[in-house]
Structure formats: C-alpha cells, structure tokens
Image (tube, grey):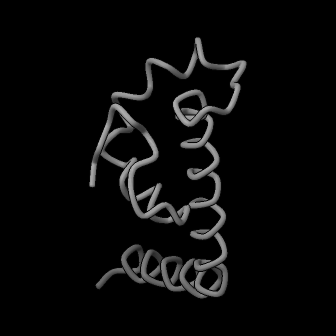
Amino acid sequence: MDWHEKWQAFAEGLQEFYHAPYRQTLTRAYRDEQDLFMLMIFAESLGIPNPMTFYTLELQPLLLEEFHDWHLRMGMPHSPLDRFGCC
C-alpha cells in the first residue's frame, strides 16, 4: 500500500467521521424537500391552486412512480387523484 492509497483511506475516514452525525438530519431534510416538490407538482390535481401548473404539468408523468410512496408518507391511505389509482 503506497502513500497515495493510505492518504485516500485516511481522507475517506475523516469524511465519514464528520458526516456520520448529520447523515440522518440531511436525509430527513432531503426527503422534506422532495415532499414539497411533489406537492408542487401534483397540487392542481389535488385541488390546490398552483400558479406554476404550466411548468410542472410536464413533470407529472416522470414522478407518477414515486407518487404512491409520497401519498402514503403524507398520511393518505389511498390515492387522492380520481383519475389515477395507484393503490
């Protein structure tokens, strides 16, 4: 093992040491951000006026696969969309 590999292993260990305490917090913050984004995408379908509908409408087909997990996380046992039943 040469010095470059040792240095790289040391740097990876330091990165893990500094990031480990915040991993759960950062994961939760990322999930909350994704939930808000998903709400913005499907707001018009849920009956919430959304001024960004023109820009977010084309993203709906890309996020339909993640919609089921999102509405379960939001506490809705069944899909709130009338025309799209994922459950």
Give coordinates of residue 9: x percent, y percent: 42, 81
Number of labels in the image equals: 0
Position of residue 84 relative to residue 29, above or below, is above
At x 54%, y 43%, the residue is 38
Quadrant of the image for the N terminus? bottom left
Position of residue 40 relative to residue 80, above or below, is above
Give coordinates of residue 63: x percent, y percent: 38, 38
Between 24 and 49, the residue placed more toward the observer is: 49
Q: Is residue 2 left or right of residue 20?
A: left
Residue 8 lies in quadrant: bottom left
Quadrant of the image for the C terminus? bottom left
Between 19 and 23, the residue placed more toward the observer is: 23
Position of residue 17 relative to residue 73, above or below, is below
At x 29%, y 43%, the residue is 85
Position of residue 44 relative to residue 39, above or below, is above
Q: Is residue 57 left or right of residue 65?
A: right
Between 75 and 51, the residue placed more toward the observer is: 75
Give coordinates of residue 52: x percent, y percent: 67, 20
Instruction: Spot the residue most to the top.
Output: 54
Between 73 and 45, the residue placed more toward the observer is: 45
At x 58%, y 85%, the residue is 20
Give coordinates of residue 33: x percent, y percent: 64, 52
Instruction: Spot the residue most to the front.
Output: 82
At x 34%, y 31%, the residue is 83
Residue 22 lies in quadrant: bottom right
